[in-house]
Amino acid sequence: MTEHGTLGVAVIGTGRMGADHVRRLHEITNGAAVAAVADPDAERAKRLADGIDGCTAHTDPDAAMAAPGVDAVLIASPGPVHEAQLLRAFELGLPVLCEKPLTPDAGSALRVLEAEQRLGRRLVQVGFMRRYDAEFLRLKALLDARELGHPMMLHCRHRNVSPSPGFTEQMMISDSVVHEIDTTRWLLGQEITAVRVLRPAAPDGSGPGGVGEPQLVLFETDGGAVVDVEIFVNCGFGYQVRCEAVCSAGSARVGDGHAMVTNAAGRWGGEIAQDFVVRFEDAYDREVQRWVDACRRGVVEGPSVWDGYAAAAACEAGVRAQATGERVPVELVERPALYR
Ligand SMILES: NC(=O)C1=CN([C@@H]2O[C@H](COP(=O)(O)OP(=O)(O)OC[C@H]3O[C@@H](n4cnc5c(N)ncnc54)[C@H](O)[C@@H]3O)[C@@H](O)[C@H]2O)C=CC1
Ligand SMILES: O=C1[C@@H](O)[C@H](O)[C@@H](O)[C@H](O)[C@H]1O
């Protein structure tokens, strides 16, 4: 850290999320500076680094993590390469904010869990940003206070205008529904024990890779709750994330998101955000600020590697349920003391 206590951050992966986090760290976050960026696309990394004094550009993530002035790492590369980058950060003893998913499958997430346990201390905050969203935080506080009685069901919907290039049917679970998996575990304080996936008959194969969508993903939890998630990554009209909790003495819903409603010429209505960068802007800002503040105090907070692992295990069950049409149980190792 600099003499003023500024945290030097290496940002790994400078695509959509990485570039947005670089902008955030540089312009919004207090107490942080982008010290290095890495991306196999050298031009992309250089363009970002050129706009920031003292920031170096790399094509090799290891070189960025070892660059002068780096105290912490923000990983925003694709999920399948997170494991190797997390293990490298562990070797260097650097705290990490790792974009979701921690890793795309349970085996690799377990290897990360075991490696962090060997260190004997937490280094990673996983980027489940809904835990920092004002609406979701209000819902969490309401459920925790039991103001509506005992929570029994969550009805969730998750719609994207269109997925990024190369998006697969499995990623509907491991990249998108992973958010509802974390939301369920966090809001209810329960583990997911089984997953099922139902598909309506689709008029055409218009989803990612030509698969039929939307799909309905169902979770059972160890507290007896039931959760349904509509996932529709190609809906075409807007970005919508909604969650309604049904409790024994009432229900509460977040995500309607009508910041403004207009009336004009025989119509009324609101606007729909077109993507997560807009809808969750404040949540990302809060998530990154909280991470930087914790790093500067020498502590690690927020969603843990256990949360990332439990989510990966539920995703793996979901991907199997998607392929087989069966109810697939979620297998978890015993929760280590480090994460209790
Ligand atoms: N929290 C959230 O709401 C969101 C999280 N994400 C997550 O952020 C991560 C990045 O996603 P996007 O920015 O949408 O993807 P993207 O495809 O826009 O960007 C990924 C970048 O990583 C680079 N890259 C590829 N292999 C790399 C490697 N081995 N090392 C370093 N960089 C590498 C690519 O060249 C590209 O510039 C993923 O984990 C994704 O799941 C993405 C969107 C929203
Ligand atoms: O994390 C995200 C993307 O990776 C994912 O592909 C989208 O479906 C989610 O809405 C977004 O929040």
Image (cartoon, helix red, strand yellow):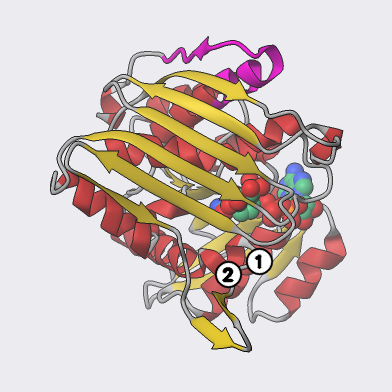
Residue 219, position as x, y percentages in the image? 45, 25
Side (left or right) of 46 relative to 91: right
Task: Identify the residue shown where x is 14% and y is 44%.
Answer: 146
Q: Which residue position holds label 1?
A: 274
Query: Is residue 84 visible from the viewing direction of this image?
Result: no
Specify start and end residues of the magenta stretch as a single range: 315-332
The answer to if 52 sits in the magenta stretch is no
Task: Identify the residue shown where x is 77% and y is 35%.
Answer: 168
Residue 186, position as x, y percentages in the image? 33, 40
Residue 241, position as x, y percentages in the image? 52, 53
> Mark 1 touching mark 2, by CB under 8 A?
yes
Is 160 in front, or is 129?
Answer: 160
- Under mark 1, the amino acid is Gln
Q: Helix or strand or loop: what does disc 1 sit on?
A: loop
Crowding at mark 1 (Cα within 10 Å: few <14, some 14-19, many 20+): some
Residue 202, position as x, y percentages in the image? 78, 33
80 over 259 or under it: above or below: above
- Under mark 2, the amino acid is Val
Side (left or right) of 252 relative to 20: left
Q: Helix or strand or loop: what does disc 2 sit on?
A: helix
The furthest residue to the bottom: 265
- Looking at the figure, which quarter contains the N terminus? bottom left
Q: Nearer the viewer, mark 1 or mark 2?
A: 1
Q: Which residue position holds label 2?
A: 278
Crowding at mark 2 (Cα within 10 Å: few <14, some 14-19, many 20+): few
Side (left or right) of 333 relative to 22: left
278 over 320 or under it: above or below: below
The answer to if 320 sits in the magenta stretch is yes
